[in-house]
Amino acid sequence: MSISLEKVSYIYEDNSDLKKPALIDVDLEIGEGEFIGIIGHTGSGKSTLIQHLNGLMEPTKGHVYFEGENIHAQDYDIKSLRGQVGLCFQYPEHQLFETTILEDVCFGPMNFGASKEEALQAAKEALRDVGVAEELFEKSPFELSGGQKRRAAIAGILAMKPKYFILDEPTAGLDPEGRVHLLNLLKRLNQEQGITIILVSHSMEDIASYVDRMIVMNRGRLEFDGDREEVFSHQKELEQMGLSVPFFRYLANDLKEKGFPLEGEILTLEDA
Ligand code: ADP
């Protein structure tokens, strides 16, 4: 069970002189249950890449398969794919538009054919999962704090019970506490419910501390793909791409785990 990209290229404005290659020959396989971080400079192709994972964009060249089937084949049920591969854009709370939070979260499941009752049950479950308090369910989205709104918007996708959940910069604009809360929530969804999480972030800190597999995009190419140690072993190349290896927290923690006698508290980048 996986999403796989085979030699995927995408060119914006392909039929004009302004051709803009955004993805070049990307080969990628994402299995169920993984926790993946995608990192790269602005313009490296991250957004274009994730929109290929649920069929929102179609490759200029190459193929995308979901569970072995070509998602752009003529008779493929792309709507069902979008229910299984949830995509959460940046600032998802801007899309909250119903009168109450609960109605908003019901919207997705109902759009995918659930009855009102099934939708309500899925919505309540999702809101509890993301940590929105019961007394807020009937409130207007506008009465919630920024962090709560973000979580409610995320619940709107979770209520569809996706197998894969892609989030574009989910912590953007949140305060440090909201950031940690949200990243922990994603970790929990991955570990307890087995949902595959694909997280796009420009923060090496967030990526390095939470994900099991890192994908580094650079000028439309998938440059590195591996665990933290593998990716950080390319420190020089990463620096050339404007990405820095967050030494204090991660490498120092690794050293400590491996038994090096480091004294006292380990500094975090934020402390430094
Ligand atoms: P990222 O998410 O890493 O910032 P994008 O996937 O948004 O990268 O962009 C990859 C490249 O494609 C960039 O060079 C960007 O300028 C270009 N691009 C993105 N969207 C469009 C568009 N709608 N039209 C033309 N070029 C685009």
Image (cartoon, rainbow, N blue to C red):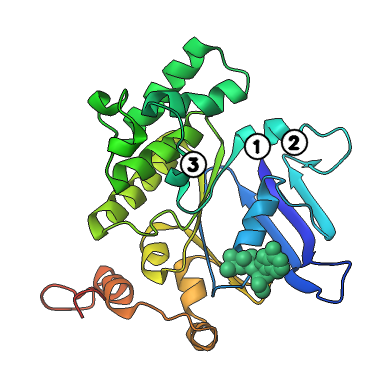
Percent from the top left, x then y, of residue 179?
31, 55
- Determine the CA span between mark 1 and mark 3: 17 Å
User: Is the CB–ligand 1 distance for label 2 below 8 Å?
Assistant: no
Q: Is residue 236 above or below residue 10?
A: below
* Lower sequence index among marks 3 and 2: 2
Above or below, 53 against 12 in this view is: above
Which image quadrant for residue 246? bottom left
- Circle 1: element type: helix
Q: Position of residue 2 (x, y in %)?
A: 66, 44
| 1 and 2 marks in contact (CB < 8 Å) | yes
Q: Looking at this view, name the residue that lies furthest to the left.
A: 264
Q: Quadrant of residue 266?
A: bottom left
Find disc 3 in the rendering and name its residue.
95
Residue carrying label 1: 82
Which numbered marker is on residue 78?
2
Q: Secondary structure at mark 2?
A: helix
